[in-house]
């Protein structure tokens, strides 16, 4: 390279602390939700708040479908940690990453038939799950063509969308906490919480992806 070419490392090349913190928080919440659901299915109890008992009963009414969805989802989240956080990439783990992601997305459509929040929740699942599967499919397309940069970009979009289910949990917590004032039931606010939670993740991930894209575009500059 000649002396007239100066390479400037993009400022956004590293991952900001707030983004990593949000990612790990979503991962922890997602795994905790799966563990809690597995415990509730294995050891159903009539105790606890009536609203939670009704939710547990809803999931217990289609146990096999619930398991077919949440177990692959948990595995996908664990694989996502490896393929996205490690700078060396996921290597061979990308194949199971795509397989378990596809299973999670397909079973999510089936789970929407039992949506607690009715058509509002179902519409959120259909919209964001479709974007998740599309992003996952694009990542797989670039994986086959060994275009690692775009593969990683679309995989990031897919993971961000899936972790939106974790972001819905604190949103639901706010609705549960304020229900004595609002008198809203889970059937009324679950759909709203889904739209809010998934939208937050979709917007944040897209802003991050676009910032990385701009950094790559303007990362190499030539001095006059």
Image (spheres, grey):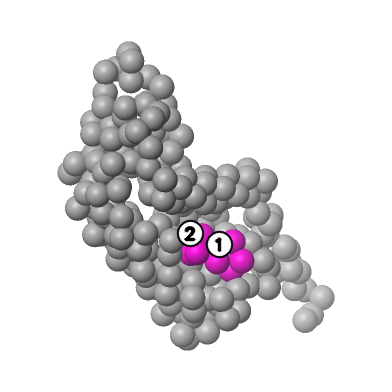
Q: Residue furthest right?
A: 3
Task: For label 2, count other residues whose C-alpha is less than 10 Å away and answer few (under 14), some (14-19) or many (20+).
Answer: many
82 within the magenta span? yes
Distance (Cα) linking label 1 and label 2: 6 Å
Q: Residue furthest top?
A: 181
- Residue 218 lies left or right of residue 140; in this view the side is right
Residue 159 rendering spot, x and y as whole percentages:
47, 59
Residue 213 rendering spot, x and y as whole percentages:
54, 62
Q: Identify the element where label 2 is drawn.
A: helix
Q: Is residue 84 placed above or below 128 in the rendered structure?
A: below
| Front residue (pair 146, 7) | 146
Name the residue carrying label 1: 78
Q: Main secondary structure of the magenta part?
A: helix
Residue at 26%, 18% in the rendered image: 183
Residue 195 rendering spot, x and y as whole percentages:
32, 42
Q: Is residue 185 placed above or below 63 in the rendered structure?
A: above
Residue 192 appearing in the image:
no
Residue at 52%, 46% in the rendered image: 32
81 within the magenta span? yes
**Badges 1 and 2: C-beta atoms under 8 Å apart?**
yes
Q: Residue furthest bottom?
A: 145
Task: For label 1, count other residues whose C-alpha is less than 10 Å away and answer few (under 14), some (14-19) or many (20+).
Answer: some
Q: Is residue 222 placed above or below 26 in the rendered structure?
A: below
Image quadrant where residue 25 sits: top right
Viewport quadrant of the N terminus: bottom right
Residue at 68%, 57% in the rendered image: 14
| Front residue (pair 196, 190) | 190
- Residue 180 lies left or right of residue 11; in this view the side is left
Name the residue carrying label 2: 74
- Residue 6 lies left or right of residue 175; in this view the side is right
Viewport quadrant of the C terminus: bottom right
Which stretch appears magenta?
Answer: 75-84
């Amino acid at each position: 390279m000649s002396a007239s070419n100066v390479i400037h490392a993009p400022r956004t090349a590293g991952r900001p602390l707030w983004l990593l913190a949000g990612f790990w928080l979503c991962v922890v919440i997602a795994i905790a939700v799966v563990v809690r659901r597995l415990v509730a299915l294995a050891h159903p109890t009539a105790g606890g708040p009536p609203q939670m008992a009704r939710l547990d009963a809803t999931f217990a009414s289609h146990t096999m479908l619930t398991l077919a969805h949440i177990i692959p989802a948990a595995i996908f989240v664990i694989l996502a940690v490896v393929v996205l956080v490690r700078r060396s990439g996921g290597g061979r783990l990308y194949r199971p990453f795509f397989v378990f992601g596809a299973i999670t997305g397909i079973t999510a459509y089936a789970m929407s038939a039992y949506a607690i929040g009715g058509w509002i929740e179902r519409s959120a699942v259909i919209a964001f799950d479709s974007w998740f599967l599309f992003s996952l499919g694009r990542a797989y397309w670039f994986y086959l063509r060994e275009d690692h940069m775009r593969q990683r970009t679309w995989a990031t979009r897919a993971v961000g969308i899936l972790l939106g289910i974790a972001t819905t949990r604190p949103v639901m917590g706010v609705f549960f906490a304020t229900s004595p004032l609002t008198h809203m039931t889970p059937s009324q606010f679950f759909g709203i919480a889904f739209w809010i939670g998934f939208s937050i993740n979709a917007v944040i991930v897209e802003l991050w992806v676009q910032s990385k894209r701009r950094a790559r575009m303007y990362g190499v500059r030539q001095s006059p």
